[in-house]
Amino acid sequence: MYRCTLILIGLFAVALSASAGEVLYNGGPSGNAAPAARPASTKWIAVTDKRSGYSVSYPGNWAMVQKAGAFPSPACAALRISVVFNSPRENAQDWYREGVLLTVYELSHQMSSKEFAMAFTEELKEKDKQFTPQNFKKMTINGASCYWYFYTIPSQPESVRSGWYFLAHGTKGYLFLLGGPSSSYERYKTTYEKMIGSFHMITPK
């Protein structure tokens, strides 16, 4: 299995320190229980990164962690930053934290969202023969074109369902990866869609 699929699993499953004392992974179904998650909140938090050229909102009871080099870069781009948003732990047996990864790339040349999506995806398919995207589609997010698809990653104790969303503007590329166990995906679908829908590209400062 190519490193990208392993990383996607690991992003939401390895121990990440989101805030003092909080652990996002408890070691699997038989691992030690993590500390209780923050109290539930319906308030959403808006984040703006003028340098990277975006704004996005996430649930107030989710954890946000910036990760350097969290996801591989394709030949057409250089990694700028990665930000992981993880859901709170539901109970002591919650082995996997549903989440959203936003990665910002510096593209080697100006690309459309479709060109960025195709170049990135074709490279992954060449390096990982098991990488088989499903339902490649186009949508619009706040006036910006976005190309997206689903991919189900074989994993234990259950498979991981992931959504891949590609946007580009000039020489900036944005990749949203959202994922969680297949059994819980539908429960988080509305939250995923609201996060994606809150995304705006802004002029970098």
Image: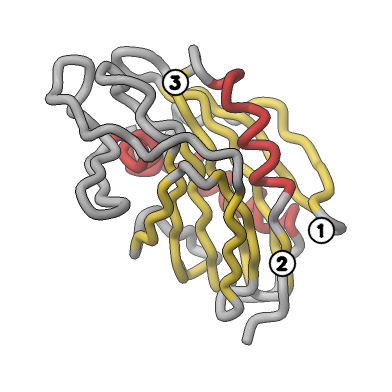
Looking at this view, is 87 or 116 the one in front?
87
Quarter containing the N terminus? top left
Across and down, in percent, residue 55 comes to 65, 64
The residue located at (36%, 55%) in the rendering is 70
Sequence-wise first label, 2 or 1: 1
Say which residue label 2 marks.
201
Is the residue 118 above or below the residue 42 in the image? below
Instruction: Give the secondary structure at mark 3.
Output: strand
Q: Residue at x 40, y 53 (%)?
A: 71
Mark 1 burial class by Cα count in 10 Å: few <14, some 14-19, many 20+: some
On screen, 48 above or below 82?
Answer: below
Query: Left or right of 200: which side holds 84?
Result: left
Mark 2–mark 1 Cα distance, whole angstroms, equals: 8 Å
Identify residue for label 1. 144
User: Residue 11: where, in percent of width, then height?
Assistant: 35, 42
Check the picture and name the quadrant holding the C terminus: bottom right
| Disc 3: which residue | 181
